[in-house]
Amino acid sequence: MAGTRSLKIKLQVLCGDEIAMGPGKADLLEAIAAHGSISAAGRALGFSYRRAWLLVDTMNRCWAQPLVLAKGGAAGAAVTEFGAQVLAHYRAMQAAVAAGSGAGWQALEAGLLDAPRERQQRADTRA
């Protein structure tokens, strides 16, 4: 975004090569808890059902216990107690990282331009 300086912290928890928890998965868990189904949660977040289901599947495969239980058909889905705990710990970590970045961010921001400089033309170094 031109003319603005900002800090974006993207906290991801990895399980092997898979992202076990990240901002999108945390948002999806909250939406499942609020809407009671994977499809409704996906719609609320602008995800296709397939995308939402794949994210749930990845989470459930990466943790010791499932984070979401699909109840089947019209019965919807629910975030498990373990899933709620994982989500709470993840959100607490996000808050702690954001709070702890204060002095470091201020130091970086002091030297950061509002927008990038124009690209410089490369000098032709061929002789």
Image (cartoon, rainbow, N blue to C red):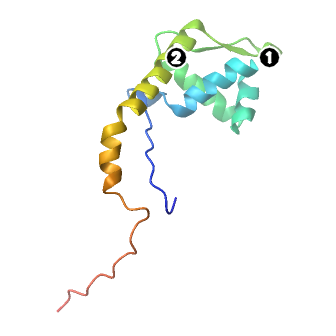
| Badge 1: residue crowd in 10 Å (few <14, some 14–19, many ≥20) | few
Residue type at mark 1: give it: Gly
Question: x, y percentage for residue 8?
Answer: 45, 43
Q: Residue furthest bottom?
A: 127
Can you see residue 73? yes
The CA distance from mark 2 to mark 1 is 28 Å
Q: With respect to residue 6, does 121 lie above or below?
A: below
Q: Measuring 65% from the left and 30% from the top, which residue is drawn there?
A: 52
Location of mark 2 (residue): 88
Q: With respect to residue 95, does 109 lie above or below?
A: below
From the viewer's side, name the closer residue of 74 and 44: 44
Question: x, y percentage for residue 50?
Answer: 68, 33
Q: Measuring 76% from the left and 27% from the top, which residue is drawn there?
A: 40
| Badge 2: residue crowd in 10 Å (few <14, some 14–19, many ≥20) | few
Q: Measuring 38% from the left and 27% from the top, which residue is drawn there?
A: 16
Q: With respect to residue 35, does 2 lie above or below?
A: below
Q: With respect to residue 36, does 23 lie above or below?
A: below
Q: Earlier in the sequence, mark 2 or mark 1?
A: 1
For residue 57, what is the image quadrant? top right
From the viewer's side, name the closer residue of 19 and 110: 110
From the viewer's side, name the closer residue of 34 and 95: 95
Circle 2 sits in a helix, a strand or a loop, which is it? helix
From the viewer's side, name the closer residue of 35 and 52: 35
Question: x, y percentage for residue 29?
Answer: 61, 22
Location of mark 1 (residue): 73
Q: Residue furthest top?
A: 81
The number of discs equals 2
Please state if 96 lies on the left or on the right of 84 as rendered: left
